[in-house]
Image (cartoon, grey):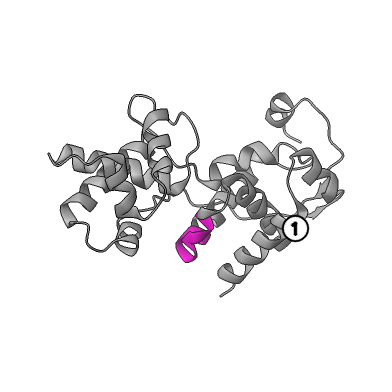
């Protein structure tokens, strides 16, 4: 285990694995557009509003995040600001009707935002945190490879982002380790230590496998 990993995670665990060589990842970044999602929910929303909402979404991604939000909350917040920015403000009830969701989702996003910024957290943001629970790996090397895998999954099946990002992060890790010949010992202990369900992770691993191998 690397010195960096020991410093970051001083608590020993029972989780061990056998390591094989892997390729270095390419650096990339996935940004999920909300325009198509808005169109799917309500095609009648004007193009200029959708474009403005997209700008707000990018602002959220590239500014500091203060708390995790449900995807519909993020879209609602961006749409709310888009109408406001373009001089046609709508209240929370109107935004909720446009998005066909509960007004409390939109209200919660607006009321709990900090400095008018919120962000949807992506699964790959949690990968490093969970890798620290597994002994015998180079976190820097493995983290980059799994993030590269994550971007491919997002592109092929972006609805996986509707799942809890922490669960998807663990599923990405498990899929990657299995695919490249790592054997995780005491898997149940690993899931227990991070408070994750074996059934949930297995379901997500299957979704990842189907989309990556299709």
Q: Nearer the viewer, residue 26 or 165?
A: 165
Q: Nearer the viewer, residue 72 or 211?
A: 72
From the image, give the main secondary structure of the stretch colored magenta. helix
Residue 158 forms part of the magenta stretch:
yes
How many numbered circles does the render carry? 1
- Looking at this rendering, what residue extends furthest in the left direction? 87
Residue 80 location in percent, x, y? Answer: 27, 41
| Point 75% across, 38% down: residue | 133
**Picture quadrant where residue 39 is located:** bottom left
Q: Which residues are magenta?
A: 152-161
Few, some or many residues within 10 Å of mark 1 (<14, 14–19, 20+): few
| Point 32% across, 52% down: residue | 97
Residue 207 location in percent, x, y? Answer: 61, 65
Taking the image as shown, residue 190 lies to the left or right of residue 201, namely right
Report whether residue 34 is seen: no
Looking at the rendered structure, the secondary structure element under dot 1 is: helix
- Looking at this rendering, what residue extends furthest in the front direction? 93
The C terminus - image quarter = bottom right
Report whether residue 6 is seen: yes
Q: From this view, report whether residue 15 is shown above or below residue 7.
A: below
- Looking at this rendering, what residue extends furthest in the bottom direction? 214
| Point 87% across, 39% down: residue | 14
Q: From this view, report whether residue 146 is shown above or below residue 195.
A: below
Q: Nearer the viewer, residue 112 or 154?
A: 112
The N terminus - image quarter = top right
Residue 51 location in percent, x, y? Answer: 21, 51
| Point 31% across, 40% down: residue | 92
Q: From this view, report whether residue 98 is shown above or below residue 59.
A: below
Residue 155 forms part of the magenta stretch:
yes
Q: Nearer the viewer, residue 131 or 47?
A: 47
The residue at which mark 1 appears reads as 199
């Amino acid at each position: 285990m690397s010195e960096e990993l020991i410093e970051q995670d001083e608590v020993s665990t029972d989780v061990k694995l056998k390591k094989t060589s892997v390729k270095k990842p390419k650096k990339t970044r996935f940004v999920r557009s909300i325009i198509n999602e808005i169109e799917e929910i309500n095609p009648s929303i004007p193009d200029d509003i959708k474009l403005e909402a997209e700008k707000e979404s990018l602002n959220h991604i590239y500014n500091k995040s203060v708390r995790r939000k449900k995807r519909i909350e993020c879209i609602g917040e961006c749409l709310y600001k888009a109408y406001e920015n373009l001089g046609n403000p709508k209240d929370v009830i109107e935004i909720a009707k446009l998005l066909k969701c509960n007004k409390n989702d939109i209200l919660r996003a607006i009321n709990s935002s900090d400095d008018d910024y919120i962000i949807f957290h992506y699964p790959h943001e949690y990968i490093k945190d969970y890798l620290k629970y597994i002994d015998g790996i180079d976190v820097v090397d493995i983290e980059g490879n799994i993030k590269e895998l994550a971007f491919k999954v997002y592109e092929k099946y972006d609805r996986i982002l509707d799942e809890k990002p922490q669960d998807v992060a663990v599923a990405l890790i498990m899929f990657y380790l299995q695919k490249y010949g790592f054997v995780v010992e005491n898997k149940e202990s690993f899931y227990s230590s991070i408070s994750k369900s074996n059934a949930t992770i297995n379901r997500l691993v299957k979704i990842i496998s189907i989309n990556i191998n299709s």
